[in-house]
Amino acid sequence: MSYISNITNAVGTLIEGMKVTMGYFVRPREHVTLQYPDEVWPVPSRNIGVGELDAYNTIRSKLTVDMNDCIGCKACERACPVNCIHIDAYKGTPEDNLQITSNGTQVKLLVANFIIDMSECMFCDLCTHPCPEDCITMTPDYQFISNDNLKTDVTPEQRWRDKDLLIYQFSKVSEEERNRRKAEADEAKKAKAALMAAKKAAAEKAAAEKAASEQAATEKAATPEVSEETARAETEAEVIKPSQEVSPAPEEATNPINVTFHEKSSAETETEPAQPDVVTEKPDESEDSTAKESENG
Amino acid sequence: MIQSLANWILSFDILSGLGYSISWGLSLFVVSALIFVFVAVNAIVLVYIERKVSAFMQVRLGPMRVGKFGMLQTVADALKLLQKEDIIPRMADKVLFIIGPWTILIASVVTFAAIPFSETLLAANMNIGLFYVVSISSIVVLGIVMAGWASNNKWSLYGAMRSAAQIISYEIPVGITLISVVAVVGSLNLQTIVQAQAGVGNLFHWIPIPLPNWFIFHSPFLFLAAFIYLIGATAEINRTPFDIPESESELVAGFMTEYSGLRWALFFLSEYANATLVAFLVAIVFLGGWQSPFADYQGAQVALAIMTLTAGMWTAFVKTKVGRLSIYPLGLSLALTLSAWLFPGFAIWLASPGLFWMIMKAATIIFLLMWFRWTFPRLRVDQLMYVSWKVILPISIMNLMGVAVWMWLTGEIQF
């Protein structure tokens, strides 16, 4: 008899199921679908911060900057672990009409460029804390789709060319003004570089002369008692560095030439610490490049 | 319909020189084109309705963004499908791969030739109409096996084999239930079957509830036969819960796995054409076809008026999930009136409510099929065979005998 009971059971359960679906079909009730662009889920507004961090929100999303308060200190740019903030600040002039921030600080730099690349931002919130004026903040606005994002050509690398809409420019300085300032700053930089290159070349020449004289002195001193080993080492060194004008003896571990050069160069050039090694190995090339730079400048 | 159209063409003075054969060919072409357009538009509308029905049954909204309430969604989908790349797999049997979907489509469209949509709207009045419909719709399985074999894909082949086994199994109970109706009418002509259901009678001949003489109210056996036919037909058109040939969770898409673009759209088209055909057949064979349910009632007009009024009130005041519907009946009636005024021939069609009732009945059955689809879980292959051979077939055979006994008891036939 399980045959008939199976059939009646099946029919009964099927009718029950159809009742359920028809109930949902007919009943005027709220649907679960969210018509996204028209409706959005509310952002939870509770704060989890205590005391000083009272405004600390649970949601960290789009970064915003209050440009009225920004003093161009680049603290956020340095703090950013992914380098998504790019700031260009130039020395302010009286025409720039620099104001006083809400904290009472006089702005001294013209922030010509303040770019946040939200395609690189990882929402770590590390940039907001170093800000002395509390002008860079994380907002709970998670919808990045809008028309008012500005495209900029200022990205250091053009690797995000398809994500340009996620690059936000906060500075209100006009592009012409920015370009003018940049050109001025570049000129000043180039002049400085040329100056430094000239100094460097002079120092190099002096060092090379000194080294040559010292080498000659040591060679004179060493020639009577040249062992086989040192001679072979010398020839090897010459083979390896044929372009070198003067090859130092291999047993001189503490090379006086390099030491002196380092001392001089570190005193003169702050920004280019890697330069001296290149210079010692290939002095011809470095001389050429510096000459070119000075010509261009 | 073709002959009357041909005669109508010849009745014009300018066209009378065409000759009967040319005008007959012309009207044949027109009628076939009409049927094909009906099938295509029908599929587009049904896909939209199916998506909406499924959404409402699952507390969703369904398509909402293309057009008002997403009404143009399926149009957009169809356009997208037409633009898609037409891929034929390298190892496929190219000839069969191309012929397969067309076979299925032709088999499912051609059956509409015998369907009487109204008193006059019938492409071919065949005396073996029912037999024609059942036999031609079986050609679909040939196309499915072609497509599955030609795809050179295990999923496709499995789907095709399952489909063949399923359709052949369920054809027997379907045929037997239809025979039980033919036994009552004594004719295979679909128009005759519809006309045999005219008038009002008692429910099951003796119970004194006045109901139309539809075969579903003829006897308890035919009442059961209607549901058996519906179940068998659901299996024949591969719809859930009998969709094992294209079961998505097992066979990706069954026999249509390798198809894309237009050919895939043809499968979809024929699927919905088949569903519509089944709905029309149920309406014709069991629900009185184009006969109005109020045909011979005293005060049928009153009943109709009350119904319309209730529906109007409901649509005007009930706020449904798709918004207030009040404007749509109004607009529809306005459009109908306007078109009836502009085209007198259309007014004649409207005056004969056959088409309206036919479509209403078919729509009810289609909704039932959708209801099945979004409620029932899929059967296993062995369960499917069990249901076919061990449950539905014996019941339908006993049903056939029961119908015969019932007719002897009620005195419809004498020995």
Image (cartoon, coloured by chain):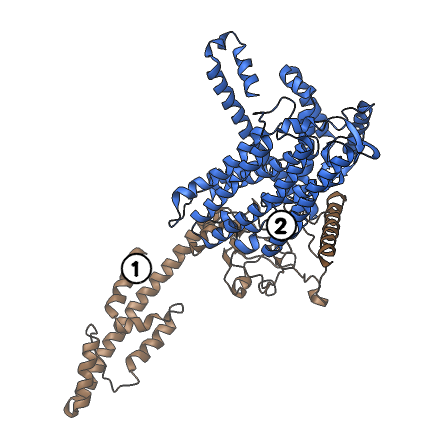
Residue sitting at the far top: B13
Query: Badge 1 is on which residue?
Result: A294
Q: Is residue B207 left or right of residue B236?
A: right
Chain B colour in the picture: blue
Above or below, comparing residue A55 to residue B197 in the picture: below
Q: Residues within 10 Å of mark 1 (few under 14, many from 20)?
A: some
Chain letter of the residue carrying label 1: A
Assign a secondary structure to mark 2: helix
Q: Is residue B32 left or right of residue A222?
A: right
Of residue A82 and residue B375, the one placed in the foreground of this image is: B375
Instruction: Give, as a three-letter code, the residue at label 2.
Output: Ser
> Of the numbered discs in the image, which one, if any, rests on residue B388?
2
Across and down, in percent, residue B214 comes to 73, 32
Quarter that holds the C terminus of chain B = top right
Across and down, in percent, residue B66 comes to 60, 38
Above or below, comparing residue A179 to residue B64 in the picture: below
Across and down, in percent, residue B105 comes to 51, 37
Instruction: Give, as a three-letter code, the residue at label 1.
Output: Ser
